[in-house]
Image (cartoon, coloured by chain):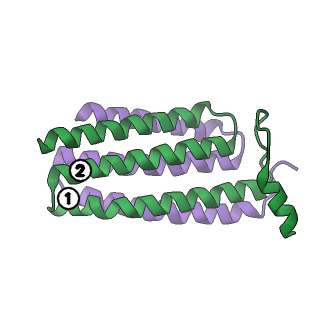
Amino acid sequence: MEILLYVLIGLCVFCLYRIIRGPSIADRMVGLDIFGILVVGICAILSIITGRHYLLDIGIAWIILSFIGTLTLAKYLQNKKLNE
Amino acid sequence: MNNTISVLFIFIGILFNLFGCLGLIRLPDVYNRLQSATKCATLGTCSILLGVFIRYGFSDIGVKALVAIPLLFFTATVAAHALAKAAYRAGVKLGEKSVHDDYKDVQDEVS
């Protein structure tokens, strides 16, 4: 089970690559969104390994905060003109 | 028996996450990346949470995983939709291999 955890942490590195190298702000926001979804999976597998139930509470709170953050940044991005 | 099925679900979920992150790296523009990454990562993480639920049943961990599944399913798709619309309105160009832009006609009709 720990191997699966290490694979998920390695996938987070892919998202960090897209956040750092993204050509526009929208690419970085996509990377951040997927990063949040991956962290929820990490919380689920950690709750299996350790047997603690509060780690899934952290996951649920992370889903809601990631949703609100992405919506706010999308609303902010609508009024920008990036490529003109 | 339950442990085998749950590990199978978790493995399938991590495979979907891997495909989503590969698409996040390899695809050419924002909209393709958004499509690949959101679909695959949402389905993969829902599958992981379903595996946790199958392993623990209706105990505290299992019920929390079951609550997290529809929450993740709806919020991730709505966030991706808002992100695509915002990126289009901000003027992010389509990739070079894209052939058709349906949303442009709709925008012209509205405005």
The amino acid sitting under disc 1 is: Ile
Residue A2: image quadrant is top left
The residue drawn where x is 36% and y is 37% is B14
The residue drawn where x is 56% and y is 42% is B36
Q: Which quadrant: the N terminus of chain B?
A: top left
Asked if B27 appears above or below B31 in the picture, the reply is above
Q: Position of residue B99 (x, y in %)?
A: 79, 38
Q: Nearer the viewer, residue B43 or A79?
A: B43
Residue B68: image quadrant is bottom left
Chain corresponding to purple in the figure:
A
The chain to which mark 2 is attached is B
Q: Which quadrant: the C terminus of chain B?
A: bottom right
Label 1's element? Answer: helix
Q: Position of residue B83 (x, y in %)?
A: 64, 57
The residue singled out by tag 2 in the image is B52
For chain B, the rendered hue is green
Q: Position of residue A27 (x, y in %)?
A: 65, 45
Q: Position of residue A18 (x, y in %)?
A: 59, 38
The residue singled out by tag 1 in the image is B61
Residues at marks 1 and 2 on the same chain: yes
